[in-house]
Structure formats: C-alpha cells, structure tokens
Image (spheres, helix red, strand yellow):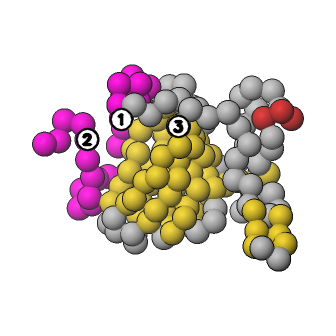
Amino acid sequence: MEKTKAHSSRDKVDHQWPKYPLVELVQPFIDVRGSIQPILDEAIKSAILIESNAGSIRANHYHKTDWHYCYVISGAMEYYHRKTGSEEKPEKIIVNVGNVVFTPPMVDHAMYFSKDTVFLALSRNPRDQKSYEEDVVRIELLSKEGFLNWRPDDK
C-alpha cells in the first residue's frame, strides 16, 4: 500500500495535499526523555477528539471545502473513500493506532469502527455546528443498516 509523506505547509503550494489518504509520518525525534512524533505541520482551525463505539459508522459524507487529517490514538478504523460523483466501489483502508489518514474536499468518505476507537481530527475549517453543516453533504457510502449511526434530524 502506497503512503505519502506529510510535508510542511511552508514547502508546498495550497491544495498540494497528500496523493494517497494514508499518510506516512516523518521519523520521530527520540532521546532519553522519550519521543516527539510530528503529526501535522499545517494551518488548521479545528482539532477535535472523537470517541467511536464498536459497531458504529461515522462520516458517510463529503465536504465542499474542508479537509481533515485523522490520527488514530487507540482502536482502529476502516476508512472508505472515493471521488465525489464516482460510481466506483470505494477503496477500503485499515487505519491503525499511530496512522494518519487524509481527506481532501470533494471526496466521499465513511469510517467503520469494529472496536472502540479514539482519534484526533485536524481540520481546515472551524467545527462549530453551523459552519460544519454548511460544508458537509451527507451520502450513504456505507449502508447504515445494523450499525450505530446518527444524523442531525435523529432525536
């Protein structure tokens, strides 16, 4: 499976994102105190910690302008993606602890969690509910039947 290296935003032009969703992290700095693992060197407006219960689905949408990097802290996710508007079967990527997956705008994506998982989502746009809802378009990339799922109109 091909990975792309995370690059500093100072080294690239806007919208020159990773070419493949699974991002290879740069080598950590290690000394007698422990290690420092760079995850992202990019201008962001949101950093959120998400806990997902086993058997749940998240995303099942695409963003018009937002992009995000997701770093798995514990557990694992199945990440599904394809270009928005495509009829192709989505590609599945297993994202394990310590892995980062990148989603640019206009990419259908969904996440399935077979076990309890905690991940950090780092995003271009603010994540207040109003801004988020204006940018997201919900789809059904993965069938939600039989899984834990939520939509804003759910009570």
Mark 1: which amino acid?
Arg
Magenta region: which residues? 129-155
Is the residue marked by circle 1 packed among few (<14), some (14-19), or many (20+) residues within 10 Å?
Answer: some
Q: Are marks 2 and 1 in contact (CB under 8 Å)?
A: yes
Q: Earlier in the sequence, mark 2 or mark 1?
A: 1
Identify whether 137 is placed above or below 79: above
Question: How far apart, in angstroms, are the residues tagged by discs 2 and 3?
Answer: 21 Å
Which residue appears at 53% of the width and 43% of the height?
47
Q: Residue visible at 39% across and 44% down?
A: 60
Q: Quadrant of the N terminus?
A: bottom right
Residue at point 54% right, 25% down? 65
Element type at mark 3: strand
Mark 2 secondary-structure assignment: loop
- Looking at the image, residue 42 sits to the left or right of residue 107; the answer is right
How crowded pointer 2 is (Cα within 10 Å; few <14, some 14-19, many 20+) is rated as few
> Which is in the foreground here, disc 1 or disc 3?
3
Q: Are marks 2 and 3 in contact (CB under 8 Å)?
A: no
Q: Residue furthest bottom?
A: 32
Q: Is residue 141 above or below residue 44?
A: below
Q: Main secondary structure of the magenta part?
A: loop
The residue identified by callout 3 is 46
Give the label on residue 151, or none.
2
Spatial separation of the CA atoms under disc 2 and disc 1: 9 Å
Q: Amino acid at mark 3?
A: Ser
- Is 99 part of what is drawn in magenta? no
Q: Is residue 99 left or right of residue 120?
A: right
Residue at the spot of label 1: 138
In the image, residue 131 lies in the stretch drawn in magenta: yes
Q: Quadrant of the C terminus?
A: top left
